[in-house]
Amino acid sequence: MKRNKNKLDDAFCLHLAQLFYAVASADNVVAEEEVNALKLMIKKEWVSGNLLSNSQAKILLSAFNQLAESRADSNQCFQTFKLYIENNNIKIATPVKNMIWKTAESIASSYAHKNKSELIVLTKLRSFFLDLP
């Protein structure tokens, strides 16, 4: 991140929700197992690793749930995350990138393993991260 490498702001949390929703909904279905995988990663990795506060975890999960309730488009959500990073010239620290990747993989693997649609989103994410400074 551009401010403190290990402290994420609320706007970034909202956009992370967009990304994680894009992974979960890539096949047009958000399974309960995917939601549970996200919640577990947020609690066990993000909050306990001091990357998110409890209130930021709630912001992220609430935004994710709102996207699910509105049946937001997976591709649009991915693009929203990507454009937010690019347009705000956000530099994501390597440990944060790694945690994003780990969370995305966990979501994609949680229900009947990764399917083709989820693999496409993960490939786009990996490519995007490789292009970042």
Image (tube, grey):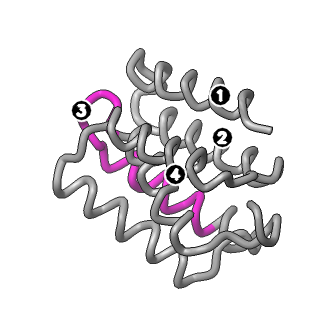
Q: Which mark is residue 3?
A: none
> Tag 1: residue type?
Arg
Image location of residue 46, percent across then percent down? 67, 65
Few, some or many residues within 10 Å of mark 4 (<14, 14–19, 20+): some
Q: Quadrant of residue 1?
A: bottom right
Q: Residue furthest top?
A: 116
- Give the alpha-carbon distance from disc 4 to disc 3, as whole Å: 23 Å
Q: Position of residue 126 (x, y in %)?
A: 65, 28
| Circles 1 and 2: CB atoms closer than 8 Å | yes
Gap between marks 3 and 1 measured at Cα: 21 Å
Q: CA distance from mark 2 to mark 3?
A: 21 Å
Q: Position of residue 121 (x, y in %)?
A: 47, 27
Q: Amino acid at mark 2?
A: Trp
Q: Regarding mark 1 in the picture, which secondary structure is present there?
A: helix
| Apparent side of residue 106 relative to residue 94 in the rendered image (left or right) | left
Residue 31 forms part of the magenta stretch = yes
- Residue 6 in the image, given as x and y percentages of width and height: 80, 67
- Would you say 92 lies left or right of 101 here? right
Q: Which residue is mark 1?
A: 126
Magenta stretch, residue numbers = 25-43
